[in-house]
Amino acid sequence: MSIKIYNTLSRKKEVFKPIVENKVKMYVCGPTVYNYIHIGNARPAIAFDTVRRYLEYKGYEVDYVLNFTDVDDKIIQTANESGKEVMEVANKYIEAYKEDVNALYVKQATHHPRVTESMDDIISFIKGLVEKGFAYEVDGDVYFKPRAFDGYGKLSQQSIDELRLVQESKWEKRNKTHWTLPCGSRQNQTKLLGIHLGEKVDQDGILNARLWQKDIWVKRLIFMQGAGFNFPAS
């Protein structure tokens, strides 16, 4: 049942060894539900469903979690434009997502957590990051500080010192790598990962090329540590 998978951290193929023998925990980034899905939403649904099915074919028991971000400015905007309640919009497009991926023969996830169901945990989570010095607040927004973690850039092989500085504001000079922590974004998925799959996962299915989302390994490690999880680097 041996499988070799490319490890971005080590830059080589390695034998896949799940944390628990014969069991695999997968967390996949789901959609923000303000409209019907497009091809960009379908891509990860199909890609990670293929990974899941292959693992199951190889004899693994797969615990597959895919979240729904059901609180977001785009959802509020859609609700205002359509004259509907925010949750009515979110519920509509969650059901539409399930219907569409089912038409693509994608299996339903084991769990479908919603951000609104874990908001208190998320707020507490972000407060923990601030208290531990990983983040700071400016004008109601909370920013993450990559320099608070010595290993930042290890996965992407990017140097913070080479990144261009943003023009100094009245608050402070911020690096472009400082990214916001709004409720309803990727850090919530990391928090939900901890709630539904525990401190460790075997596969993290997050596909995004934005600067502040490149180093998934570092982000996941720091958020878990900042929230009080014992999350090892290896």
Image (tube, helix red, strand yellow):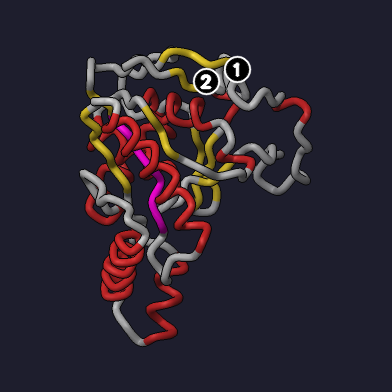
Is residue 186 found left or right of 18 in the rendered image?
Answer: right
Q: Position of residue 40 (x, y in %)?
A: 52, 57
Highlighted range, magenta: 25-31
Which residue position holds label 2? 7
As rendered, which of 112 and 48 lies closer to the eye?
48
Residue 33 is drawn in which quadrant?
bottom left
Dot 1: few (<14), some (14–19), or many (≥20) neighbours within 10 Å? few
Residue 159 is drawn in which quadrant?
top right
Residue 21 is drawn in which quadrant?
top left
Using the numbered discs, state the Cα–Cα distance from disc 2 to disc 1 in whole angstroms: 6 Å
Residue 127 shows in the view:
no
Is residue 94 found left or right of 73 in the rendered image?
Answer: left
Q: How many numbered marks appear?
A: 2
In the displayed structure, 105 sits above or below 190; it is below
As rendered, which of 116 and 193 lies closer to the eye?
193
Q: What SS does tag 2 mark?
A: strand
